[in-house]
Amino acid sequence: MSDRASLFIVVMVLLIAAALRTWDLTALPYGLHADEITNIRIIETARAGNIEIFYDIGRADRIEGREGLYHAWQAFATAIVGTGSLGYRLASVWVGLFTIALTYAAGRRLIGQLGGLSAAGLLTVSLWPVLLSRQITPSVMLPALVLGVLILLMGILPVYRRRWRRGNTTGTATGLGVLLGMCIYAHPAGLLILLFSLLFIAYMLRTRGSVSRQISRRRNSYIGLMLFIVVVLSVPYVVSTLNNFEASGIRRFLSEHVSDYMLRDTLNSLGGLMFVGDQNPTRNLPGRPLFDPFSGLLILGGIGWAIYKRDEPRYALLLIVGLTLSPLFLFSANAPNFNNYAPILPVLALFFGVAASALYHHTARGGQYALALGLIGLLTFNLSWTAYDMGAWRDDPAVQTAHHHRLGQLAAYVDRSGGTRTVICGWRADQSPTATRLTDAQFISLLLNRHAQTDIRYADCRYALVLTAGGAQQQVIIPNADIFEQMHDDISAWLAMGDYVDDDTLPAGSVLVMDVEQALADKGGQLTTGQMVSYAPESGGEFDGRWHTPISFGGNLTLLGYITDAERIYQPNDVLTVTSYWRIQGTVPPDLRLFTHILSDPSASPPANTDVIHVNPRFLRDRDVVVQVTAVPLPSSLPDGDYHVSIGGYQDSSDIRLNVLANGEQRGTRLFLDGINVTAPEPEDAPDESEAEDASADDDTADDEPAYEGRR
């Protein structure tokens, strides 16, 4: 085969690989699974500048670490292409395509052009390598690292026949040292990559007979340089392992790859190659084998041929690599686990190439054409099989559940809707960026590809809602239909004015379209003529003076009005509910909080208070109206009496309150609403002696009745 023909075929293979790995990238499947979410959160930590050897991913029951090389790479890549379901996955796609190119490069050096093309073709059209290249996981780097080390090992040692070029080995040895040093920062399997490199170097120095003297004279210094670089680069890793062994790769390797049922799991791992594959829907169409049976037989044939030719360094290299990496998948718990096959994938593909090359070169010329056509037919079958199963995998209910399909669909819809004003429900006032579990709103936010170009607000939707641009048309995203069961009536009344979007790509009842501009204007008129407010006594003027809303605050905030049940007689342990309407008139403080205090004396500390805002203030815009429902539990020990109710706002990071403004002049930092009365219930009167005697007689009569009558 000519170099030009080989190059053309490689380009075609890479184009097919790119098509499979980018086909419907953001929607196949919709959403993310739990491990991808964990990796994204580490990526965001790295983007914020927090680079660590081992990231503690915060399991509730134990410490669990994760190496940071992949996440550092993702932080760099997403700084260029952006985040979201597309940006996070593109970095993995690039690594997957680079792996295909490296497979051809390694195969061509070891077994010739046909072997390299066959190996690259098998990885291109097999389902798990395709899915791996689409996932946000450190495992995607392992095949590329293994192949990179193989190619550089062949550069400093006489593995195959080539024309020697003086002076090119120093750079190769340096690159190998750096790459081996990087491997241990990518994944626990990097330790085995380092191990097989050292084993092969020892093999070459030990067994090559007369060539060993040549190796000693020419290359020992390069090997020493490589080892020196590895030692230097591994020092931080060793120190971190000693300081935090529980999070280290060594501990995870031992705990994850030592099975309690070794024989059973070993048989399952071997069966996963050709018969029954991984059942985990995040990694596979449950049960589909890693390769088809015929490809599996060719891989076994390639292993057999390599054993037969083991005296040749190129085959010895493949055998040493395969033997060193095989414990990762052979002895792992809950086998077959396709994640554990990731490092050995290119080695299996190269064995496939060994078999294809050996068969081709040991077949008569007439049979070679038939063999080539058969090989093309086998890869074409795998291509069609993989394309079909990708669709089946996307539609599998278990896959959709694992990937939070509903939330993924909603995120894709928000991206498609472009500049439409959007309120995403599911935001929580107490949500933490480091919490183990994401809220629905956080999950959707992770998936958005056009966050900066999308007109988005985030709200709790149980106790608050944003009416954008004065109630103009907007869409409300409902991640979880159960939210309506927890929703306050004052919020559900607004949502009841909307209409559900009918779209085949959306879950039923997940998107509402609202246009409540006139209804909000009518409500504003009711509020400004309804319940009144008083300025704080410390602001000067009459404390008992009553004023209609709206009242302006600093920080571009205006109270349009409020609703309370002021006529109600409250009891200790009751809950006071205040529904307030706030208009945004510019950029508000990103850490804005609203407070509601219950006071017996305006100058005293409040015996009851709630400080909360149930929307994300960072995303509020001019003319938005926030409907906020605040619940203030009254203590059981609250004395009887009349109480004042005050509200206002402050910045959470500094506790600085927003000023109340009247015609541009400061009037304190709080407003007083209609007060409430708290009266404990009267205790029940004790019965007199005659009533007690009658009750006692009744009890005696009841005791004489059959037991079942009393229970009845």
Image: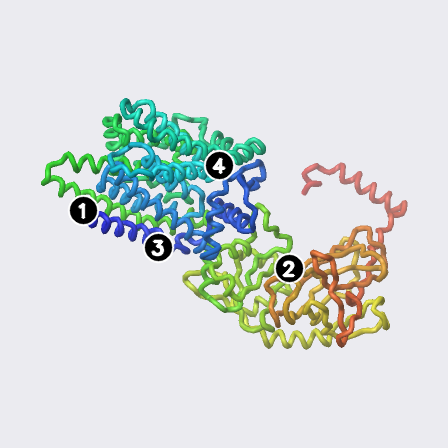
Q: CA–CA distance between discs 4 and 2?
A: 48 Å
Percent x, y of residue 380? 23, 47
Residue holding disc 4: 233
Tag on residue 134?
A: none
Q: Count neighbours of disc 3 (C-alpha within 10 A) and say few if under 14, some if 14 to 19, many if 20 or more.
A: some
Residue holding disc 1: 2
Percent x, y of residue 432? 61, 50
* In front of the other: 216 or 158: 216
Q: Amino acid at mark 4?
A: Leu
Tell me the residue at 73%/72% (across/down): 551
Tag on residue 23?
A: 3
Q: CA–CA distance between discs 4 and 3?
A: 38 Å
Percent x, y of residue 702? 76, 40
Q: Amino acid at mark 3?
A: Trp
Q: Are marks 4 and 1 in contact (CB under 8 Å)?
A: no
- Seen in the image, is 261 located left or right of residue 316? right
Q: Amino acid at mark 1?
A: Ser
